[in-house]
Image: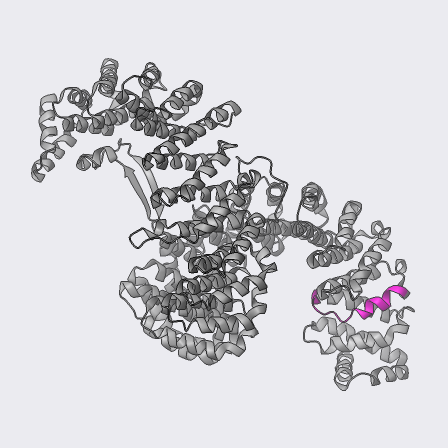
Amino acid sequence: MAQSLELLLIQFLMPDNDARRQAEEQIKRLAKDPQVIPALVHHLRTAKTPNVRQLSAVLLRKKITGHWGKLPPNVKQSVKAALIESITLEPSSLVRRASANVVSIIAKYAVPAGEWPDLLPFLFQCSQSSQEDHREVALILFSSLTETIGPTFQSHLVDLQPILLKCLQDESSSRVRIAALKAVGSLIEFINEGADVVKLFRDFVPSILNVSRQCLANGDEDVASVAFEIFDELIESPAPLLGDSVRSIVQFSLEVCSNQNLELNIRHQAIQIISWLAKYKASFLKKHKLVVPILQVMCPLLTETISGDEDSDLASDRAAAEVIDTMSINLPKHVFPPVFEFASLSYSHANPKFREASVTALGVISEGCFDLLKERLENALHIVLAALKDHEQMVRGAASFALGQFAEHLQPEILSHYSTVLPCILNAIEDASEEVKEKSYYALAAFCEDMGEEILPYLDPLMEKLVASVQCNQRNLQETCMSAIGSVAVAAEKAFIPYAEQVLELMKSFLVLINDEDLRSRARATELVGIVALSVGRERMEPILPPYIEAALAGFALEYSELREYTHGFFSNIAEILGHGFSQYLPHVVPLVFSSCNLDDGSAVDIDDSDSIDNGFGGVSSDDDTYDEPRVRNISVRTGVLDEKAAATQAIGTFALYTKKSFAPYVEESMKILVKHSTYFHEDVRLQAIISLKHVLAVVQAIPAEHIDVAEKQKEILDTVLNIYIKTMTEDEDKEVVAQACMSVAEIMKDSSYVAIASYMPRLAEATLILLREDSCCQQADSDSDNDDGEVNHDEVLMDAVSDLLPAFAKAMGSNFEPVFAQFFDPLMRYAKVPRPPQDRTMVVACLAEVAQEMGAPFSGYIDRVMPLVLKELSSSEATNRRNAAFCLGEVCKSGGISALKYYGDILHGLYPLFGASEPDDAVRDNAAGAVARMIMVQPQSIPLDQVLPVFLRALPLKEDHEESMAVYSCICKLILSSNPQILPLVPEVVNVFAQVAISPFERDDVKTQIGSAFSHLISVYGHQMQPILGSLSPVHANSLAALANKR
């Protein structure tokens, strides 16, 4: 074989393509025989040309795995010896590297089996050789071996560290230094969390930094680039490898990114390190007081301008903006002051790049620092709106971007400035610059979406400009305008009807576009038709829907993922307006939804065959041998497919929700998809799967269980859904997904009989307890994080949903909930302790109120532990906290019975200020009234009614929180109907309150019916005495009261 193989190898390297193909076929045939291994080794050592020796090594790497176990021991030994000789004696560096890769593959099997005991000693000896080539290849082999026997090196780190440190500092060879850097990087994933090992690894950092600085000074930026790759690995490592070295890494990165003499790509790498630290190790930046130093570099970088021939994707100003954005999300309180100061100082700067940087900075922090920016909104708007009128286009463009960010993230406070903001946006969309126009339409879309009736005075000028712009010839501008029209339609609701016909007619021309470059516009138009349909309603849309539905269905044939994504959204909207009427379309649209859900993920796997492809050996590496072990270097996912899957997964739930029983034929396939998508790699798809599972379950539960198979199917799907939710609660890494699972569990508890879900309660309770203790996967903080400064932020996304689970348990379990609540109580109360923020405390108080409401008398055992917190919250500076505290006190008194009596005096004392003029919030006063009403209803003899009732009645009628109406007005009616002596002197005030309730459009009929009964009782008992009181009422009030009395 050896002789024929040599000829084939030479033939494969010929320039003649036909000869190459013939050789490749023959090589593939011969490679199926284990004897190909010694033959290839022979040519690796004896072939005259380096290309043949290298090709032999490449083929060895491809075939060694499949044949190694079939080789006799003596052949294995000769193969290993030949490879070591090749590494040490081979003059060609390419052949040495290819041989090192073969050693790595063999080591995977030989080292664990004890068949190659002298490999590691050889590696240590070679790395300390006086020959540069030997040192380099030893380090390359070391890096390669970590891919196959990496854990083996953990026990040798103490011996390895000084060798690697020495190689890092090798002054005579940059090749050795680079190889040493890569070797250090390859070790990171195998470092465990043992303190000694971590310290050894941290000791590498100063040497890495020293080498990098020297090389940058000498113009050798490749080495510094490798160093940044190492730092990237350090940041992502689960072991706490950074430690105090984070300070020196940040300092080096800031030196590099601020040095305008360096190439853009190395500066960009440096900025990326800061960005990763901000994203994954924010607590380190805070602990080491690095936030301000970083921002002192990043903010000025926003003012940089790149030349026309440089890559804009690497631009420092763009990268710096991303860093500031990330930092603001993770460290808002620390980022806001320096950035706002920079913006305030720069917005009037003579240099337009500084003015642009000023508003860009405000725009990028608006998501993370939304609370702080809301407090300074007046000042921030002054800066941005002034920039919107700047004579420089770049400044106006940045201002329109910032305004869009404000509109998106500073809701609802930004809406109170609509009279100032909207006219400025209307002016900006007339800008001479197309870029400014487009960004202004984006700002308009974001601003209008959350407006309500405030938009009505602006509808005509807005729609006039939007309709005109959507008819221009620029696709980008048209698409942004469509988005803006959609936002206007959402805000205007029925007031959009006069504009709907023209908009829908305009969209028809977009819905027939078929050229690839136009399909994004078609997607936007499809989305807009669905939004307009929601605004104008079923009555007007249903008759004209068919052509739009046909166009939407036809779009699926165009093979454009974004169009399919928006079309799923379109049909979801149509299902919402048609309700059960959408059932006729299910046979047409559900298969399309399933098709999108089952699409290939589009993973693009890049196989690292650099040692073969780079040297013309690509043909051999395409071999289909099942034993090949290519190394995966990179995985990427087409985001378009991901978004389409998310939209399609959402559509399953929407169709189920609105068509109900008609969706039953599609339940089985839907469940298969949703079960699979509940563990999908991306959280957007998982989130929609978690939501949709609840709606599909509801479809099944709505089917009458007249047959045993239906009942069994209902039980089976409930079991599947709850098991997924329980697993998600503790194992999913995304808080929003976990929060949705919690909300869905709470809904299922409320909608299902206790018998149906009783067997799941222990596991649901355990999952809830894990979340309350912050021990779930999604709550795990950086394992690299040291003690923080004690600052804790309210986890609005997750913990509000978790706390809502407790009342759901209480409602489902009733008095059986007490033993479970006993487990929940201490973990829940921990959220009310220092240093927890006010939002956490009020979350706890609201949760306790609802639990007391559902749990009833057993809650009395917790009153002594709850009352100090709730009474203290009555005097909170936050209105929400006072409101929830007042509500909680009422429910606790209602459920606590005698146990709460001793606190009545303290409660009334705490509630009294909430009835006064110093209380600015109507909802707080309404809840205070609700609390007093509940106390009177439960223990009227324990309340000094002569003092309480006048204050109580002066706070009525309720102004905002009408959920308190039944409690408040039932209390008054009960006192009237029982002829309580303390209420009788206050009948004029009572009648006045009744009259206002009678004409209120916000009060429910059952509340008004009760008032009618009480008022009728007053008339029948006190007759003529009521005439002066009635005479003091306006005719409208008197007539409304009389009408209520006559209804009974």
Hey, which residue is sitting farthest front in the picture? 350
Magenta segment? 947-963
Q: Is residue 393 above or below residue 427?
A: above
Give the left or right position of residue 889, taking residue 205 as reference.
right
Give the left or right position of residue 268, taking residue 331 as reference.
left
Residue 38 lies in the magenta stretch: no
Q: Can residue 227 be seen here?
A: yes
Picture coordinates of residue 372, whole percent (x, y): 59, 55
Camera-side residue: 82 or 644? 82
Q: Is residue 961 above or below residue 637?
A: below
Residue 954 lies in the magenta stretch: yes
Picture coordinates of residue 523, whole percent (x, y): 36, 65
The colour scheme applied to this rendered structure is: one colour
Quadrant where the N terminus is found in the figure: top left
Give the left or right position of residue 923, taking residue 43 as reference.
right
Q: Can residue 674 be seen here?
A: no
Residue 44's image quarter?
Answer: top left
Residue 416's image quarter?
Answer: bottom right
Picture coordinates of residue 58, whole percent (x, y): 21, 29
Picture coordinates of residue 49, whole percent (x, y): 12, 25
Q: Is residue 1021 above or below residue 214?
A: below
